[in-house]
Image: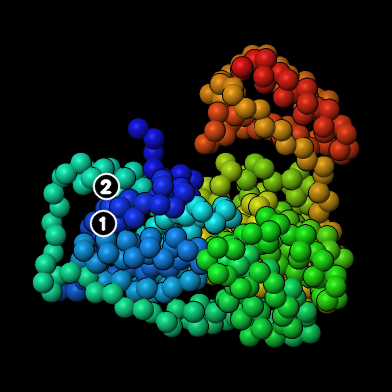
């Protein structure tokens, strides 16, 4: 039986794979799993009920899914604080700051509007370990198969109320952690018609920036529609047209961002991470002078960190793995090329608005344009080829393939890199090659893709 939880919660086409019944059942199971292990201090709250924070992005389907989640939680005896449309990191922050027992976010991030998803947060606003997700899924399946569960009645059922203060509390937190104000900067913000449509412009404006907006009129149907971090051409044009210092593009749930410099050139997650790493090192805030990234980070990022005296730790692809390594080693900064950046002193997950604000603060503090700051690293040409319909389980053991990879690495030397990675969700292998020259990278990637087809097909 396929696992319900993927790399970032449960996702599917709303009302097809992700139904109201599934949302309700998972919420009941999550309420039991995430509230059963009370600490001593929490156990002393005799007679009190657990509390959950529930938020969503603006998708139309989020309206009925939110109702199902709230119903499930309240039926399991959990009081619900409904915060409405807010970014994923806002729900994580409020779960922690309000001392809630769990948080729930309804969003499919950068996916098209028909999709939706459910993410759960544990106490403190932390993403769940695989073990907790497995327990929730197993309990949900037991209940769905008819296993009875203790249903509170009367005064034992959960109560539901809107927590309208969530917006202001979260924005105040974002502005409050900035090292300096943004006065004098003009910034274009593309909210992807998503969860940050109100939050991000408000936070930048309160911090002193002159804000120009696009993608900030969600109607429930237009999220990620030719806008946001997956479609940045509109942001490029707007930055140049308005003579802005730079622009920021969010995804649907605003847990990540990409940027565009004053000339309209993209600044990706690796470059953002490089700028913030140097700023934090200079301020003595980069713990152990180390940054955590994934194996997909550009080789240019690694070389830039070496020049700056910053150690780089690399994890499997996925911000959850970056976060796990950061917690394990006590590191303060990590992220992905896609724009998930985690500043652990101020957030428990990737936060696109916070990332954009920190980037803007660096521009304002140094008086240097973003293009110059991002120039600390040179992005080496990177080619990615997906090879479908192959036995991805043998990617690390097929002798012919291992020999071809070793030969390619010798050919590229110190100025290139090869990475073969099986997809986590599809029967395909991703072939990634970096080289100093784009044509060289394409040639090597093409040869390796042919070997993957031959050896694993």
Note whether 456 is above or below 152 in the view shown. above
Q: Position of residue 270 (x, y in %)?
A: 71, 53
In the image, 349: left or right of 435? Answer: left
In which quadrant of the rendered view does residue 184 lie?
bottom right
Q: Tell me if 262 is positioned left or right of 194 in this view.
A: right
Does residue 401 appear in the picture of this structure?
no
Residue at (70% x, 75% y) in the render: 213
Residue 387 circle label: none
Q: Which residue corresponds to the image point at 30% horizontal and 52% vertical from the top-left?
A: 21
Judge by depth and name the residue closer to the eye, 203 or 71.
71
Horizontal side of residue 131 vs 345, given as left or right: left
Q: Secondary structure at mark 2?
A: helix
Residue 153 position, x and y percent, is: 11, 67
**Where's residue 215, x and y in %?**
66, 69
Q: Residues within 10 Å of mark 1 (few under 14, many from 20)?
A: many
Q: Residue at x 49, y 46 (%)?
A: 7
User: Residue 405, image x and y in percent?
Assistant: 72, 23
Closest to the observer, 253 or 130 = 253
Name the element at disc 1.
helix
The residue lying at 58 percent from left, 18 percent from top is: 397
Q: Residues within 10 Å of mark 2 (few under 14, many from 20)?
A: many
Residue 35, located in which quarter of the rendered image? bottom left
Q: CA distance from mark 1 to mark 2?
A: 8 Å
For the image, the number of numbered tags is: 2
Q: Nearer the viewer, residue 443 or 271?
A: 443
Identify residue for label 1.
Answer: 28
Q: Quadrant location of the C terminus?
A: top right
Q: Earlier in the sequence, mark 1 or mark 2?
A: 1
Question: In the displayed structure, would residue 260 be above or below residue 396?
Answer: below
- Residue sitting nearer the eye, 452 or 237: 237
Residue 140 is marked as: 2
Marks 1 and 2 close (CB-CB < 8 Å): yes
């Amino acid at each position: 039986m396929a696992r319900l939880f993927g790399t970032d919660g449960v996702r599917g086409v709303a009302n097809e794979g992700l139904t109201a019944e599934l949302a309700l059942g998972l919420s009941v199971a999550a309420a039991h799993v995430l509230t059963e292990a009370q600490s001593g201090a929490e156990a002393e709250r005799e007679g009190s009920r657990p509390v959950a924070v529930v938020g969503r992005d603006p998708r139309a389907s989020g309206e009925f899914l939110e109702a199902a989640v709230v119903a499930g939680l309240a039926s399991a005896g959990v009081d619900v604080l409904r915060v409405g449309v807010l970014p994923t990191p806002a729900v994580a922050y409020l779960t922690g700051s309000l001392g809630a027992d769990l948080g729930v976010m309804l969003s499919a991030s950068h996916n098209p509007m028909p999709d939706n998803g459910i993410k759960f947060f544990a106490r403190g606003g932390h993403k769940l370990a695989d073990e907790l997700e497995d327990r929730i899924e197993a309990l949900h399946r037991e209940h769905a198969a008819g296993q009875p569960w203790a249903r509170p009645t009367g005064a034992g059922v959960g109560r539901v109320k809107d927590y309208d203060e969530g917006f202001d509390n979260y924005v105040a937190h974002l502005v409050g952690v900035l090292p300096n104000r943004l006065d004098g900067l003009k910034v274009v913000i593309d909210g992807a018609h998503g969860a940050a449509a109100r939050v991000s412009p408000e936070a930048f404006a309160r911090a002193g920036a002159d804000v120009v907006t696009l993608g900030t009129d969600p109607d429930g149907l237009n999220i990620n529609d030719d806008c946001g971090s997956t479609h940045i051409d509109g942001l490029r044009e707007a930055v140049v047209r308005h003579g802005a210092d730079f622009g920021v593009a969010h995804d649907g749930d605003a847990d990540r961002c990409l940027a565009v410099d004053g000339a309209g050139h993209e600044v990706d997650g690796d470059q953002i991470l490089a700028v913030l790493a140097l700023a934090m090192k200079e301020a003595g805030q980069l713990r152990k002078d180390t940054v955590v990234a994934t194996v997909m980070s550009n080789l240019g990022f690694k070389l830039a960190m070496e020049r700056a005296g910053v150690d780089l730790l690399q994890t499997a692809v996925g911000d959850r793995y970056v976060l796990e390594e950061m917690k394990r080693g006590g590191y303060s900064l990590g992220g992905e090329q896609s724009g998930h950046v985690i500043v652990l002193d101020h957030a428990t997950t990737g936060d696109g608005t916070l990332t954009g604000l920190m980037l803007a603060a660096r521009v304002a503090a140094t008086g240097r344009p973003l293009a110059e700051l991002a120039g600390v690293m040179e992005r080496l040409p990177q080619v990615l080829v997906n090879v479908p319909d192959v036995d991805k389980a043998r990617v690390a053991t097929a002798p012919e393939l291992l020999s071809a990879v070793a030969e390619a690495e010798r050919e590229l030397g110190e100025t290139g890199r090869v990475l073969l990675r099986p997809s986590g969700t599809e029967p395909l292998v991703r072939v990634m090659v970096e080289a100093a020259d784009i044509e060289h990278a394409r040639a090597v990637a093409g040869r390796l893709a042919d070997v993957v087809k031959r050896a694993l097909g």
